[in-house]
Amino acid sequence: MRPMIKARVLQERCTGCGVCEQLCPMEAIGMEGGKALVLDHCSGCMMCMQGCTMEAIQPMYLEPEPEMAQTGPHGHAPVARAWGHGDPER
Ligand code: SF4
Ligand code: SF4
C-alpha cells in the first residue's frame, strides 16, 4: 500500500547533521551534497522529523484530500460553535 505521506527535506534549513539518517528505520535517508535526501521507499513514519532540530523535515502529502487538508483527518474544526449560545459580547 502506498503511504499517503512522505518526508521531504527543506534544503535551505538542513545542516547535514545526519540525525535523521540515523533515526530512519527504513534507511530511506541518504546524504547528497552535505544535505539529507529522502529516498523513494520512505514509509512516511516521520521519525526523522521528530529528530530534526532544524525543522528541516516536513511531511509531504501525496494524495491530498482538500477537506482533510483544511481541517485535519478527524476534524479539528471548532466544535464549540455548534453548542455555543453565541454571546458576541463576551
Ligand atoms: S536531522 Fe535535519 S538538519 Fe540534520 S541532516 Fe536531517 S534534515 Fe538535515
Ligand atoms: S518518514 Fe520515516 S521512513 Fe521516511 S525518511 Fe523519515 S524516518 Fe525514514
Image (cartoon, rainbow, N blue to C red):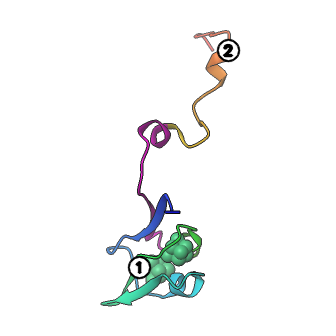
Residue 58, image x, y percentages: 45, 64
Q: In this view, does 34 lie to the left or right of 21?
A: left
Residue 57, image x, y percentages: 45, 69
Q: State the mark number for residue 84.
A: 2
60 to 51, vertically: above or below: above
Circle 2: element type: loop
Residue type at tag 2: Gly
Look at 37% across and 73% down and name the residue there: 13
Quadrant containing the C terminus in the rendered view: top right
Q: Which of 42 and 56 is in front in this view?
A: 42
Circle 1: element type: loop
State which tag comes first along the sequence, 2 or 1: 1
Q: In this view, does 83 lie to the left or right of 31?
A: right
Task: Name the residue carrying label 1.
Answer: 39
Mark 1, ligand 2, within 8 Å: the answer is yes
Indicate yes or no whether the magenta region holds residue 68: yes
Residue 75, image x, y percentages: 59, 36
Q: Mark 2 near mark 1, Cβ–Cβ under 8 Å? A: no
Q: Which of 48 and 40 is in front in this view?
A: 40
Q: Nearer the viewer, residue 52 or 5?
A: 5
Look at 62% across and 10% down and name the residue there: 86
Residue type at tag 1: Leu
What span is colored magenta in the figure? 54-70
- Judge whether residue 52 can be spotted in this image: no
